[in-house]
Image (cartoon, coloured by chain):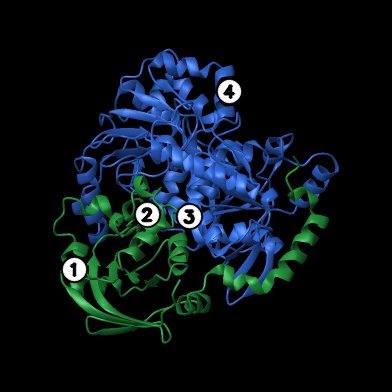
Chain colours: A blue, B green
Amino acid sequence: MATLLDKLWSAHEIKAEHGQSLLWVDRHLVHEGSHHAFAKLAERGLEVSEPGLTFGVADHYAPTRNRDRIEDPQVAVMLERLEANCSRHGIRLFGLRDPRQGIVHVIGPEQGLTLPGLLINCGDSHTSTHGAFGALGFGIGATQVAHVLATQTVWQAKPRAMRIRFEGEAGLAVTAKDMALHWVSQLGTGGAAGHAVEYAGSAVRALSMEGRMTLCNLSIEGGARFGMVAPDAVTLAYVKGRPMAPSGADWDAAEVDWQTLHSDADASFDRDVSFDMAEVAPTVTWGTTPDQALPIGASLPDPARLDATQAEAARDAMDYMGLTPGRPLEGTPVDQVFLGSCTNGRIDDLRAAAAVLRGRKAKVPGLVSPGSMLVKQQAEQERLDKVFIEAGLEWTGSGCSMCVGMNGDLVAPGKRCASSTNRNFRGRQGKGARTHLMSPAMVAAAAVTGTLTDVRPLLEGRG
Amino acid sequence: MAGWTTHEGEAVVLDRRDVDTDQLIPARFMSASRSEGYGRFLLHDLREGDADFPLDRHPGASVLIAGPNFGCGSSREAAVYALVDAGIRVVVAESFADIFAGNAVNNGLLPIATPEAAALRAAIGRGAAPARVDLATRRLNVAGQELGFALSETAQAKLINGWDDVDLTRAHAGDIRNFRDRRKTDHAWAWPSA
């Protein structure tokens, strides 16, 4: 009868009143942007109630190069503030010099902090990533971050349950990123607002943990604060042996608990949507919201044929993006590429991009920022760094980097970037920057041709 | 944070859908301390070079009437700080992003989600209209129209009393302790192992 959401919710509910639940938080992840929350705590003279369940990460402002001498004083201050707040409250920090440093949503899973059955909060909307393990992961604002710091709990109204199924087999070069952009383009940026999305179906089961994380990560771009996938053998194989994951008798007990973490066969959802994988192609955004996305083979929409509210937004977006209605998406020249972010900065993503770039040269400059320093290390063991460098791309340290531009990695005004990130909002990658979202393999294809390109012909004859 | 029950002010239209948090406050401004004031960052890049921007035509406006999916994008509460510090107390739109709406209420900003938003935008157009909001009766008067709006009991109490969640939680300290102890006994695996 119960959905995965019901089970996770009731396992964490301490109290319910006036339609709000007080929920226990198993893991709380803070970053440089959490400075407002620490300031609120200080204002009220409050202490961190569970420092052992709180972890700090330097990612949003983390320099991707020249870490020994941070040139931007604003960046240096943000990193110092985080270090001071963590040290003051006894919070373990994955700081800039820690070999495990990386993007919060990459290193949580990597370190075994993210587990099935947990509730995970972070002051970042892409916290939905952690739901890929069958956990409740959701982003919160600074006031709520301060509340979690002070009480290890969070007030939240239970969302409605929504299921999105992907059935069938993924075609060549069709990835979790394409599945996400596809559903968001079909349902809209507010399409899943008020809902927690559980992803299901044969194509979701077939995804690696990296793919599931990409899919859950992008839930918020369709308005859903939560995305989740029921844990299975793939999940357990990923988690087992991670540094902070349970072991021995704790592992055995966890496995028993986790067996119940799935929606019952007769569970009903407030909304149930299904997509056929035959309809999902390598997808690219053309506008300034993630739902303005099309298969790479499509032409740009003609606003005259859209309904009035969409037409104006489309006209506006094409104006900002410097695009002409009705023209094919493919062949649009790009100025640069970016590979990385909490959406697509994991080892699978780098492998997929390297498979396209191997033995080829990029026609445009680009930045590759691995999701964590351990992902970087792994990629270097596999000699993927050589592939990127020989292609002419820059291989750097890990952080949020050019996805959000806080560390100074920016796209210049008017420049067009093929990007493996999550938001194509105006000015997201820098003032006046033009962002096209796509999968890592599609970013690599854009690098090779200097244009928005269908990656599939470039994969011919390659494993 | 000070609570409020009624608000009277001037309403203007921001005729855009999907006003995202990166537009509400570009990332480069977010390292500032709150005490420096965030109002000057509000919709910074959209306003720049647009002398005709609604909030500049009517600098005293405190009620913003915008399009659907207002506040989509990141969890940055700074987007709400920018609105509040610029004097905005109420935003009316067809719909709001979930995280934004929660952040708004935690900072004394009322998000009114109503299908009437489109009609209000049409009625006010490029001008400004007097507006009155009553949290107790959940009613909005603007441009000669009166309409009711939905608001959860919790959000209503928080806005009127100026409470935040920490205030609400104090009463449950014992329950939280018990829950924690029980979880640690029954599900020890849920604590980090190293």
The residue marked by circle 3 belongs to what chain?
A
Mark 3 Cα-neighbour bin, 10 Å: few <14, some 14–19, many ≥20 = many
Query: Which three-letter amino acid code belongs to the residue tagged 4?
Result: Gln
- Measured as percent of width and height from the top left, residue A427 is found at 30, 44
Q: Which mark is residue A377?
A: 4
* Residue B156 as seen in the image, left or right of residue A243: left
Q: Are marks 3 and 4 on the same chain?
A: yes
Do we see residue A168 in this rendering? no
- Measured as percent of width and height from the top left, residue A349 is found at 51, 30
Cα–Cα gap, marks 1 and 3: 30 Å
Q: Earlier in the sequence, mark 1 or mark 2?
A: 2
Q: Secondary structure at mark 2?
A: helix
Q: Secondary structure at mark 3?
A: helix
Cα–Cα gap, marks 3 and 2: 17 Å
Q: Which mark is residue B58?
A: 1
Q: Earlier in the sequence, mark 3 or mark 4?
A: 3
Residue position marked by numbered label 2 in the rendering: B21
Cα–Cα gap, marks 1 and 2: 22 Å
What residue is shown at x 15% (from left), y 68% (from top)?
B126
Cα–Cα gap, marks 3 and 4: 33 Å
What residue is shown at x 39% (from left), y 23% (from top)?
A457
- Measured as percent of width and height from the top left, residue B127 is found at 15, 71
Q: Which mark is residue A36?
A: 3
Q: Is residue A179 above or below residue A225?
A: above
On the image, which quarter does residue B86 sit in? bottom left
